[in-house]
Image (spheres, rainbow, N blue to C red):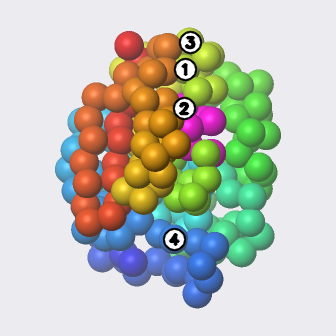
Amino acid sequence: MRIIAGRFKAKRLISPKTDKTRPTLDRVKEALFSIILNYITEDSCVLDLFGGTGNLALEAISRGAKFAWINDKESLSISTILSNVKLTNSLECVKITKKDYTKCLNQIANENVLFDVIFLDPPYDSNYGIDVLQKVSDSENGYLKKDGIIIYETDKNFLLKLEKNKKGEILNSFKNLQCIDERAYGNVVLKMYKWR
């Protein structure tokens, strides 16, 4: 796992040997950042809510984002994120929190922080991503800037399970968010959302 472009280009990041952390593959990350290129500017703020290794947030910082909030509830993930932040000398532009995602979202709301890019890469077999998208949609103008984007990473098996349980439409039925794009890379699926 490495930083693909920007000021930390080719820097190798630490990834713990555990099945609790599943970093986004380099080829998927490269494709993703090509798609969201225009959202990463020198004024961009990004949120990596299920940080894991900090891989996505640090790629955004490397490409010029001003600030990244990285959250994870697992101690091993937090120590990995800290190590990777130190490896890239990016402590001054990163905030790290160790919380359940709902508590982190509450803190973000209390601090009234809005993001240009929100990365959602939760465990593939969970409804966490759907819960977050619902919470953002219900907030109407919270968490995400007016022209911001949410990238939800999941996998084909989870989407097939939703279809089987007749819940497939849930990912396209948020009141205030619309899915503007969907890409598949092997089993990995990226769904992108913006305000309606």
Query: In the displayed structure, would residue 182 be above or below residue 176?
Result: below
The one of 138 and 78 positioned closer to us in this rendering: 138
Going by the numbered disc 1, the residue's amino acid type is Ser
* Residue type at numbered disc 3: Glu
Residues marked 2 and 1 touching at CB (< 8 Å): yes
Q: Which residue is mark 2?
A: 133
Quarter of the picture containing the N terminus is bottom left
Is 86 situated left or right of 1 in this image? right
CA neighbours of label 4 inside 10 A, class few (<14), some (14 to 19), many (20+): some
Label 2 vs 3, first from the N-terminus: 2
Q: CA distance from mark 2 to mark 1?
A: 6 Å
Q: Residue at x 62, y 16 (%)?
A: 139
Q: Which quarter of the figure has residue 173?
A: top left
What amino acid is found at the position of numbered circle 4 in the picture? Arg
The dot on residue 137 is 1
Residue 124 counted in the magenta span = no
The answer to whether 196 appears left or right of 111 in the picture is left
Front: mark 2 or 3: 2
Q: Residue 4: image x %, image y %?
A: 28, 67
Q: Residue 22: which numbered mark, if any?
A: 4
Sequence-earlier tag: 4 or 3: 4
Q: Earlier in the sequence, mark 1 or mark 4?
A: 4
- What kind of residue is marked 2? Leu
How packed mark 1 is, by other alpha carbons closer than 10 Å (few <14, some 14-19, many 20 or more), is: many
Quadrant where the C terminus lies? top left
Q: Residue at x 34, y 53 (%)?
A: 189
Real-space CA distance between mark 3 and mark 1, rounded to the nearest whole angstrom: 5 Å
Q: Position of residue 63 (x, y in %)?
A: 32, 53
Let me know if residue 68 appears in the view.
no
Q: Which residues are magenta?
A: 128-133
- Residue 140: numbered disc: 3
How far apart are the alpha carbons under marks 4 and 2?
21 Å
